[in-house]
Image (tube, rainbow, N blue to C red):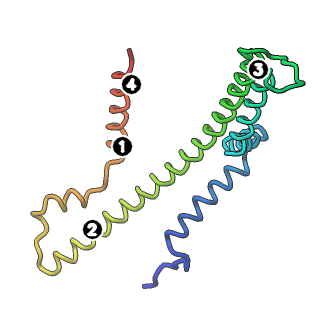
Amino acid sequence: MSKPARSSVPAKARSHHVIQALKARADAERTPGQRLADWMSDAFGSNAFLLINAICFAAWSAWNAGVIPGLEPFDPFPFGLLTMIVSLEAILLSIFVLIAQNRSERVDQLRQEIDLQINLIAESELTKLLALVARIAEKQGIDVAGDSELQDMLSPTNVENIEHVLQRQIANLKADNAI
């Protein structure tokens, strides 16, 4: 009986590689708009952007409050033009952040699906392993038939039943939150 070929790369490293490859593939498939949104989220979510905004707001306020000699105010207090510009900036930044978050959420959903598939495979393998151990125990004269917990573990997990239970729980949550 031959052993199945094993990779020389440890399982943890392989799974990390798969997840990295998934992210790289998702990054490569981004539309130009998604690339722009990601870039803007990165750039505008930085300390440098915060500092630039703070300096600009302080300079604008000082200029238009008339505290800088030789500069005539063009947007007197309460700074209506500044308020409009800041509001537009906030709207645009919010949109770009939401685009980037939506794309990130789709990648996370793919990762969760991979995790679920791996967990289902692992559960199946563990059930098989338990069955083999139970058979070995029986061959050694150990009675495992009376162990109800083991008998439950030996039966495959009913994934459809779990799905139905989750769907009912989600429906109940929606019903509880609907007003």
Q: Which of marks 3 and 2 is in front?
A: 3
Circle 2 Cα neighbour tier, 10 Å, few/some/many (<14 / 14–19 / ≥20): some
Identify the element where label 2 is drawn.
helix
Q: Which residue lies furthest to the right in this view?
A: 70
Displayed quadrant of residue 173:
top left
Q: Which residue lies furthest to the bottom in this view?
A: 1
- Counting residues from the N terminus, which is met first, the one under dot 4 or under dot 3? 3
Inter-mark Cα distance, 1 to 3 = 68 Å
Q: Position of residue 154 (x, y in %)?
A: 25, 61
Identify the element where label 1 is drawn.
helix
Q: Which of marks 4 and 2 is in front?
A: 4
Give the residue type that dot 4 points to.
Answer: Lys
Inter-mark Cα distance, 3 to 2 = 78 Å
Residue 157 vertical placement versus 167 (above, below): below
Q: Mark 2 points at which residue?
A: 130
Looking at the image, residue 135 sits to the left or right of residue 90; the answer is left
Looking at the image, residue 84 sits to the left or right of residue 13; the answer is right
Q: Residue furthest front?
A: 69
Q: Do the residues labelled 4 and 3 touch (CB within 8 Å)?
A: no
Q: Name the residue under label 3.
A: 65
- Counting residues from the N terminus, which is met first, the one under dot 1 or under dot 3? 3
Q: Where is residue 155 in the image (x, y as percent from the top left)?
A: 26, 57
Q: Mark 4 points at which residue?
A: 174
Identify the element where label 3 is drawn.
loop
Residue found 73% across the figure and 35% down from its top: 53
Circle 1 Cα neighbour tier, 10 Å, few/some/many (<14 / 14–19 / ≥20): few
Q: Which of marks 1 and 4 is in front?
A: 4
Residue found 68% across the figure and 27% down from its top: 90
Q: Tally the numbered discs.
A: 4
Inter-mark Cα distance, 4 to 2 = 39 Å
Residue 110 vertical placement versus 19 (above, below): above
